[in-house]
Image (cartoon, rainbow, N blue to C red):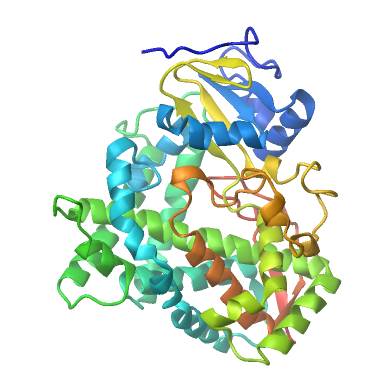
Amino acid sequence: MSRSITIAKAGLPPGPKGTLIGGNIAQMGPRRVDFFLDLAQTYGPVASFRVGRWRVFLVSDPELIQQVLVTDARHYIKHFGARTFKPILGNGLVTSEGDFWLSQRRMMQPSFLKALVLSYAPIMAELTAAMLAQWAPGKAVDLEFEFSGLTSAIALKTLFGLDDHGDRAKVDASLIETFDSLTARVDAAIRLPLWMPTPTNLRLRRAIANVKALVDGFIAQKRSRPLANDLLSTMITAQREDGSRMSDRQLRDEAVTLYLAGYETTALTLTWSWYLLSQHPEAERKLVDEWRRVLGGRSPNAEDLTALPYTSAVINEAMRLYPPVYAIGREAMTELELGGYRVKRGYTILMSQWVSHRDPKYFPEPERFLPERWLDGLAARLPKFAYYPFGGGQRLCIGSHFATMEAMIVLATVGQKYKFTLAPDAVIDIKPQITMPPKFGMPATLELR
């Protein structure tokens, strides 16, 4: 049922013309973030375009973003792009909605209390040291591959309490295939139903089945043993107000969601941080000076983090320029108003961190890597949704503190021993999916500090 709203502006927001069937899909291209940025710079804080049959408003004003994610949040659900990933994420926190989502969020929140998250710091440092033991000066590495392996191991240990590298490799391979296929479905003007036995669909269904079978095995293994200090144990024992607990299927959906969120986004933050540092030796020098002064060569612990402001600033700046998740979408469930325009039911509102984090109004010289901008209280002065790498509102990423601590511990542990020289023939580009990995990896050579 429509709500009583006041519309000040007739028609759609300004935006580029598209084709009859595909809309603006062809204009978006593989580097869709450039399309979003150009859209905002050309047409203003509310712009309009079309992806196939879906009408999309791109919103870049912090107050309007807050209206969508906070004020009117109950009138929106996740958009069509996010829902495309339900075959692998199921009914986990990222894709579930309404009262069920709220019940799950409340039940899982204790698993991410500060004391429990801080208890994982030694695991993060230990597994980082194990990775470093496999490295040697002069070795050629792909930073994305190395950090994905590390954060995947950390996620496997802290989530499931497992150390099996073989299982991790199987999960990761199937997840990569799944997300490549599902991302292609988001971009397609015409999408065939998953039940149709096309070669692509069959490969996708096999990959999804592999992930689910492996995670089901982890859960069964966990239930057969005494519970321990890991996230899955806390989720198994978590109860709703009526005393009910999660089914194995729901545990699997939440575990897959947390595993993905728990390794890929942090791996990308580390990868892009080192890329930026390799291009800005002065910032790297300041970082190393801080580590020598505070840590003196040892791995950081949870208590050290507040004494590492420049390390925190580097990570903040890396997530500003290369946000691990570069866009958030919501679909209107009823008729709404936004920026003076009518938002019809079914319209999608897109908010892009890639765009917002490059607004010169809040970030002078927005394309410049400048960690110092975070050292004088900038975060407290910014509007709430000028910088939001972990989303916002009630659906703020539940693992944001975990991810930030992990990135700081790994960056400092690795950086005190090694520096990286980017391969001279490296081609650095982005590959926007649900996250933003480097398109061709991040080839570099290890050098002792």
Spot occupied by residue 395 in the image (x, y as percentages of width and height)? 44, 45
Residue drawn at x 48%, y 35% is: 81
Spot occupied by residue 299 in the image (x, y as percentages of width and height)? 58, 87
Front-lying residue, 317 or 5? 5
Looking at the figure, which quarter contains the C terminus? bottom right
Q: Is residue 276 left or right of residue 302?
A: right
Residue drawn at x 66%, y 31% is: 28
Report which quarter residue 200 is drawn in: top left
Front-lying residue, 6 or 429? 6
Q: Is residue 220 left or right of residue 18?
A: left
Front-lying residue, 273 or 395? 395
On screen, residue 398 above or below 402: above
Report which quarter residue 422 is drawn in: bottom right
For this orientation, the residue located farthest to the top is 10
Q: Is residue 173 visible?
A: no
Report which quarter residue 133 is drawn in: bottom right
Spot occupied by residue 158 in the image (x, y as percentages of width and height)? 38, 72
On screen, residue 364 above or below 329: below
Q: Is residue 291 visible?
A: yes
Residue drawn at x 76%, y 69% is: 277
User: How many numbered discs sit on the rendered protein?
Assistant: 0
Q: Is residue 366 left or right of residue 181?
A: right
On screen, residue 360 above or below 194: below
Spot occupied by residue 257 in the image (x, y as percentages of width and height)? 38, 53
Looking at the figure, which quarter contains the N terminus? top left
